[in-house]
Amino acid sequence: DQQVKQNSPSLSVQEGRISILNCDYTNSMFDYFLWYKKYPAEGPTFLISISSIKDKNEDGRFTVFLNKSAKHLSLHIVPSQPGDSAVYFCAAKGGTYKYIFGTGTRLKVLA
Amino acid sequence: DTGVSQDPRHKITKRGQNVTFRCDPISEHNRLYWYRQTLGQGPEFLTYFQNEAQLEKSRLLSDRFSAERPKGSFSTLEIQRTEQGDSAMYLCASSPGTGFDEQYFGPGTRLTVT
């Protein structure tokens, strides 16, 4: 049972444009959500997070939006840069210690 | 702060052999996690330590797997009688242990069982 889903395995965006990565979850008990970026041969790197009491969190070029009624979150990267090319994972936590990760979306930013 | 380190980075072993991996978390991080990641999947939770206490263990962790965190510092993950299905990337993460705390991952240990 995949509680956190990233339905787009890959995404290509032109440099300078907006990248939008999506994530859906099924467990209404989740109260904290995170996005991680992963380069090849490295572990995931924390990018940005959001608590369920908020609907938006910004950090520089990165903004995460949370729609609790739709059980949906998205990561916006604007403007996209070639160095943003990586695999992006969303993760969720609620009530326990463990984080549940999605399957990832591979972002390719074209120069 | 040198980040989370893992050793070895790569391990090739024959089926039936035992392997042990080490994780050194960020100093003063109370929480330590082990994950397994296979191709095309996100990290899957294996186990969690709060200081030296192992507080949660996934159903994914069979009896062949054991993890320790003596003295609440580094941790080891041992796999006994390895099987080809154990081939994966094993990731370690640590977090400060306060509030909604973000996890910081190590580079992982890639295990190949032949």
Image: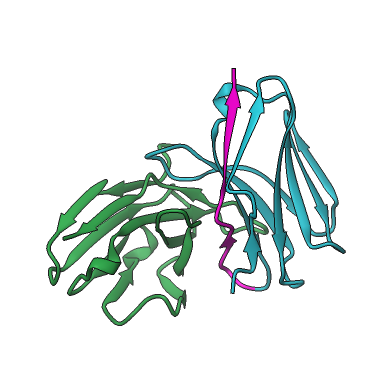
Chain colours: A cyan, B green
Q: Residue at x 32, y 69 (%)?
A: B68
**Magenta region includes residue A62:** no
Residue B8 shown left or right of residue A38 in the figure: left
Number of residue marks:
0
Q: Dividing the picture into quarters, in which one does residue A63 lie?
A: top right
- Tell me: residue B92, above or below residue A42: below
Q: Residue at x 63, y 49 (%)?
A: A8
**A32 w.r.t. A8: above or below:** below
Can you give x and y, in whole percent of width and height, for residue A106 in the image? Answer: 55, 41
Percent across and percent down for residue A5 are 64, 60
In the image, B67: left or right of B79?
right
Please identify the quadrant where the N terminus of chain A is shown: bottom right
Residue at 32%, 49% (x, y): give it: B6
Please say whether residue B50 is visible from this viewpoint: no
Q: Residue B86, image x and y in percent? A: 29, 66
Quadrant where the C terminus of chain A sits is top right
In the image, taking residue B22 as reference, residue B51 lies left or right, namely right
The residue at the point 29 percent across, 68 percent down is B85
Near-viewer residue (A86 or B28): A86
Looking at the rendering, the stretch of residues picked out in magenta corresponds to: A96-111
Q: Name the residue at the bottom extreme.
A: B63
Q: Nearer the viewer, residue B6 or A64?
A: A64
Above or below for A101 versus B54: above
Q: Is residue A97 visible?
A: yes
Compare residues A39 and A6 and report the one nearer the observer: A6
Q: Residue B97's image quarter?
A: bottom right
Q: Nearer the viewer, residue B108 or A75?
A: A75
Look at the picture and state if A84 lies above or below A56. above
Residue A104 in magenta stretch: yes
Is residue B107 found left or right of A23 in the rendered image? Answer: left
- Relative image position of residue B65 (x, y in whole percent): 29, 74
